[in-house]
């Protein structure tokens, strides 16, 4: 790279640090509130004009660090760790908890170790990871968080991030998910987290549930160590599971077919799982309740944003609805619709949420996460609104509250009202699981056994009108 280009990059970095240091939000969005698309184009143009900087590959990937405290380990005793991409001058930190189911007894853990070893051991972790979605350093993919310090914490404890039990001569595995988070936060305090203004603890699937279980612990950890200036928040993606009755009851022989309630009851004993103290007091002797979003959420002090597909594939799997190959029959179809209704009910008291009526699983680390919309609003936009409402809240001395005053032009409760899977036209593309071909919403619903004539009759409308509504996502 030529010297002038390098000088331009350094000058840009210095100017960015000056801007960042003065304000917790790296960019002021208020002036472009009505024209975000144009703003993102300008950001893209700026990025292209600074191409020489990107040509330097300025730490775009996150790099692996093993924990200095070697007593905090993965299931098999190998060291736990984290990936980090620092953003010098930024006072915002995003810590992401990876998902990947769990195991709940020696048999299911042995099977997991044979088939999914990277979720129980760090021995073959790559040295770097590329961030996608909310972890991306590219402004066009991640318009609001791209310049934050990014930390990816791999899931290798199989305990929904709840355990605090080391490996011993009597036990085959360690379950230390809760301690891994605590130790990562301690190490980050030597890397700039001590000067942070915002720490967003995010996670998907089991990591999303892990956010609900640990966000207050992280806030308390920083507070007791004297770091009272750090605002701790949570973002739980696809981790809002229901303890509902399975469509078809099966014995608890493996992780997939075991009913969520039974699996967690067994798991919490096996892991020595910890739950937030306020939730534990609300469910003494039945702490397993705290693994279910709608039961733990009301007990939390930290602000939490919930991103949840209304027809979550992982929930359907544990409920023994398997959408493969053959069209489903009417009983399954009714069960799926009822699941969406039940999920809506459990979200009614959640202050900030994004809940599209799609059949999918995990959202915030998808490269196309900006494309999915509820009421015309994308998730990055909704998170920005939430950030602003919390920032506004601080100025009226109401931090650590679920109640956030409205901010002009911002909706915080974004939930689809249409009743079928993929009735939202911005849902991710569906592919036929046998042929791999893309399906339209109508093709998908017919594949699912959806009877347009019958459904129109039940709704008291013409079949043609119903088809039009489905195509438009109303």
Image (spheres, helix red, strand yellow):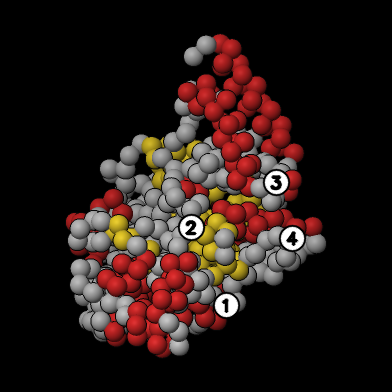
- Which residue appears at 69% of the width and 70% of the height? 403
Against 326, is 9 above or below?
Answer: above
Please tell me in which quadrant of the rendered image residue 327 appears: bottom left
Q: Give the Cα distance between marks 3 and 4.
A: 13 Å
Q: Give the Cα distance between marks 2 and 4.
A: 22 Å
Q: Which residue is mark 2?
A: 372
Q: In this rendering, does residue 218 appear at all?
A: no
**Labels 3 and 1 touching (C-beta < 8 A):** no
In terms of secondary structure, where does tag 3 sit? helix
Q: Residue furthest right?
A: 396
Q: Which residue is at the front of the view, 101 or 144? A: 144
- Which residue appears at 50% of the width and 49% of the height? 134
Residue 382 appears at what percent x and percent y? 60, 58
Q: Which residue is mark 4?
A: 408
Crowding around mark 2 (Cα neighbors within 10 Å: few <14, some 14 to 19, many 20+) is some
Crowding around mark 4 (Cα neighbors within 10 Å: few <14, some 14 to 19, many 20+) is few
Q: Reading the chain from its start, which is encountered first: label 2 or label 1?
A: 1
Residue 24 appears at what percent x and percent y? 70, 45
Q: Give the Cα distance between marks 1 and 4.
A: 22 Å
The image's mark for residue 348 is 1
- Which residue appears at 79% of the width and 57% of the height? 395
Q: Which residue is mark 3?
A: 32
């Amino acid at each position: 790279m030529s010297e002038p280009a390098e000088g331009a990059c350094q000058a840009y970095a210095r100017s960015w640090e000056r801007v960042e240091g003065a304000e917790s939000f790296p960019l002021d969005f208020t002036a472009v509130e009505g024209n975000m698309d144009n703003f993102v184009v300008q950001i893209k143009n700026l990025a292209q004009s600074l191409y020489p900087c990107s040509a330097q590959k300025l730490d775009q990937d996150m790099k692996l660090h093993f924990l200095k405290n070697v007593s905090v380990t993965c299931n098999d005793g190998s060291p736990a760790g984290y990936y980090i991409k620092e953003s010098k001058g930024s006072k915002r930190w995003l810590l992401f908890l990876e998902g990947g189911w769990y195991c709940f007894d020696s048999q299911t853990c042995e099977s997991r170790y044979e088939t999914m070893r990277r979720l129980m051991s760090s021995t073959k972790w790559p040295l770097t990871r590329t961030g996608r979605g909310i972890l991306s350093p590219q402004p066009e993919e991640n318009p609001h968080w791209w310049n934050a310090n990014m930390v990816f914490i791999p899931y290798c404890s199989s305990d929904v991030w709840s355990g605090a039990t080391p490996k011993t001569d009597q036990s085959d595995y360690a379950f230390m998910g809760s301690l891994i988070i605590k130790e990562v936060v301690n190490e980050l305090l030597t890397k700039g987290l001590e000067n942070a203004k915002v720490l967003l603890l995010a996670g998907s699937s089991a990591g999303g549930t892990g956010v609900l279980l640990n966000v207050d612990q992280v806030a308390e950890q920083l507070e007791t160590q004297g770091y009272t200036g750090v605002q701790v928040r949570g973002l739980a993606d696809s981790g809002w599971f229901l303890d509902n009755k399975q469509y078809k009851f099966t014995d608890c022989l493996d992780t997939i077919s075991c009913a969520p309630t039974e699996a967690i009851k067994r798991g919490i004993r096996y892991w020595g799982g910890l739950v937030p103290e306020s939730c534990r007091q609300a469910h003494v002797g039945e702490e397993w309740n705290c693994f279910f979003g709608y039961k733990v959420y009301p007990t939390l002090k930290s602000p939490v944003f919930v991103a949840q597909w209304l027809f979550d594939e992982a929930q359907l799997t544990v409920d023994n609805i398997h959408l493969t190959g053959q069209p489903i029959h009417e009983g399954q179809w009714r069960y799926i619709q009822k699941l969406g209704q039940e999920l809506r009910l459990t979200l009614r008291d959640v202050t900030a949420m994004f809940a599209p009526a799609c059949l999918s699983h995990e959202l915030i680390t998808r490269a196309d996460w900006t494309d999915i919309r509820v009421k015309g609003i994308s998730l990055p936009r909704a998170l920005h609104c939430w950030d602003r409402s919390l920032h506004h809240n601080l100025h009226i001395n109401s931090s650590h509250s679920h109640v956030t005053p409205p901010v002009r032009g911002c909706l915080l409760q974004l939930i689809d009202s249409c009743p079928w899977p993929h009735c939202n036209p911005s849902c991710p593309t569906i592919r036929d699981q046998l042929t791999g071909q893309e399906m339209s919403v109508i093709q998908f619903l017919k594949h699912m056994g959806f009877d347009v004539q019958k459904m129109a009759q039940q709704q008291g409308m013409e079949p043609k009108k119903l088809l039009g509504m489905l195509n438009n996502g109303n």
